[in-house]
Image (cartoon, rainbow, N blue to C red):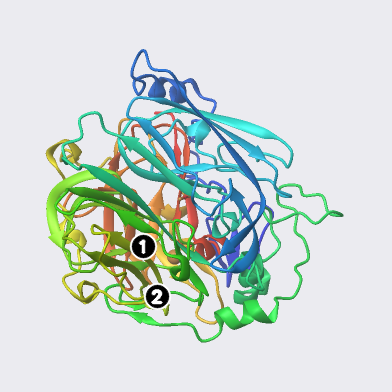
Amino acid sequence: MNPRLDRRGFLVLGGLSLAAAACGGDAKPGAPAPVPVAPTDPAVAAAEAGRLAPGRKPVAVRLKAAPVTLDLAGREVQTWAYGDGAGTTEIRAKKGDLLEATLVNDLPAESTIHWHGITIRNDMDGVSPVTQAPVMPGDSFTYRFALEHPGTYWYHPHIGLQADRGLYGPLIIEDPDDATGAETEFVIVLDDWLDGLGTTPDEVLTALNPALSGHAGHAMTPDATMTPGHVMTPAPPSSAATALVSGAHGNSTPLGGMGGHIAYPLHLVNGRPPADRPTFTARAGAKIRLRIINAAAETPYRFAVGGHKLTVTHADGFPVEPVEADALVLGMGERYDVLLTPKSGAWPIMAAAEGKAGYAAAILRSSSSASAPSVGSRPTELDGRLLSYADLVPEGSARLADRAPARDYRVELIGGTDRYVWGLAGADAAALRAVEGERIRITMRNSTPMWHPMHLHGHTFAIPGGARKDTVNILPGQDLAIEFDADNPGPWMFHCHNAYHFEAGMTANLTYVRA
Ligand code: C2O
Ligand code: CU
């Protein structure tokens, strides 16, 4: 039978009803239905109150989302972006600042901005229809929120597959008490690219599964009006889209299975493909910091710098005890901060698509006379010691105190065996609830043959071993428990950050309820 999205947004597949976008039913018959805490609840503003440092001027930025033509090393692509590059509009502020970011929507589609990883006030989380109405074409919306934790974050729309176009960017929150001692820093945003190269993300979704295409959040055609939940008839996928999803199923050992389904034609560092790779220039012997963000929709990356070891200091913005590695694997949505001290020369930076062909590249240069490494020169460090989650020990301030969970949930990650559908299953998946102040544990079981980068909005949870993260890779067959304190009221999404898995149903809501 064909999967379909019913009116309330539940993905219905072979009799299983998976929580897609709405809240589930209630456990005990006869018990009064718990009262959810809405984005407009005074508790949301109350949680925000403690986050602002007094006496600061707000940091105001304007993000115009619009169709643009980009030049990717000589290939012109039509896409959508903020500003004039893919992922190049950096927002930088300090811990305790108030960010005032105005989204000006010049797209031919509704949009929002989600601030990935931020312990944000719920009504600014940018998830339509959960936390706000979508920002319609021609409208604007100002996101106004305090930045509680320093670190490396990013932003992207939370509608359809818009983030697989050029709509994303880094959000860097500086720490006034930064202890890394870094003299310079570089932000490295990684992205997989297909938009405008004969196809679009929406066409690729249609090629993966025609039954999934055309629901809310996609581009409006001039003669169609879009209302939430309105289903448009999809065009058949182009041959370019079909080609990208046929037979592109490479395996990854660290990720325990298939790396992904889509053979992206290009991979970018800060909006630039390998043929136009950026150069980061630093003084030999200086201590430098790299903030690495995987903003890709469907590609994990293995990252290394030729000739250098990396000292990892932060995972998803939160500090860890410094630990050395040759290479890092970043799932979609994950970030790491690393320190290194450049040796004199010009060194290849490579983010190899993990379990897929292709790579993104850059140069680290600390000598003007050294000749550039050849494009595609693969640092041997990529095959050296990989960072694992077991290496991540939270720095004291980042440690979540031990506490027995008040709620202990189980969620199963499932996938279709004969078609491209994904979901979160089990009774708990449709009824993830928290009362403010409680410790929550969610144990995920991955019953699929593929890894999933699971992301929770509004909280930074602890993974086994204690490091704090907001996005965690779960390998095929693995059970993994995350824990967090319910200290940020409102409805929050909990989903796979593979953008196509998300579109195919791998999402649930965490709902705060009144005690
Ligand atoms: Cu970057 Cu719902 O996520
Ligand atoms: Cu997934």
Q: Residue furthest front?
A: 369
Report how far apart the C-alphas of labels 1 and 2 lie in the structure: 10 Å
Q: Is residue 258 left or right of residue 254?
A: right
Vertical side of 229 occupied by 402: above or below: above
Residue 45, by quadrant, is: top left
Of 437 and 121, which appears nearest the observer? 121
Decide which of 37, 450 is in the foreground and name it. Answer: 450
Q: Is residue 251 left or right of residue 403?
A: right
Which part of the image, by quadrant, shows the N terminus? Answer: bottom right
Among the two numbered marks 1 and 2 on one chain, the one whose residue lies closer to the N terminus: 2
Residue at screen point 16% across, 35% down: 397
Q: In the drawing, what numbered circle is on residue 290?
A: none
Q: Residue furthest top?
A: 55
Vertical relation: 465 (above or below) 120: below
Residue 343 percent across, percent down from the top left: 16, 60
Ligand 2 quadrant in view: bottom left
**Amino acid of disc 2:** Gly
Question: Which residue appears farthest toward the bottom when viewing the image?
Answer: 247
What residue sits right under mark 1 in the picture? 331
- Nearest to the observer: residue 484 or residue 369: 369
Numbered label attached to residue 259: 2
Secondary structure type for disc 1: loop
Tag 1: residue type?
Gly
| Residue at x-position 57% and y-position 61% | 503
Q: Which residue corresponds to the image point at 77% horizontal and 61% vertical from the top-left?
A: 232
State the quadrant of the C terminus.
top left
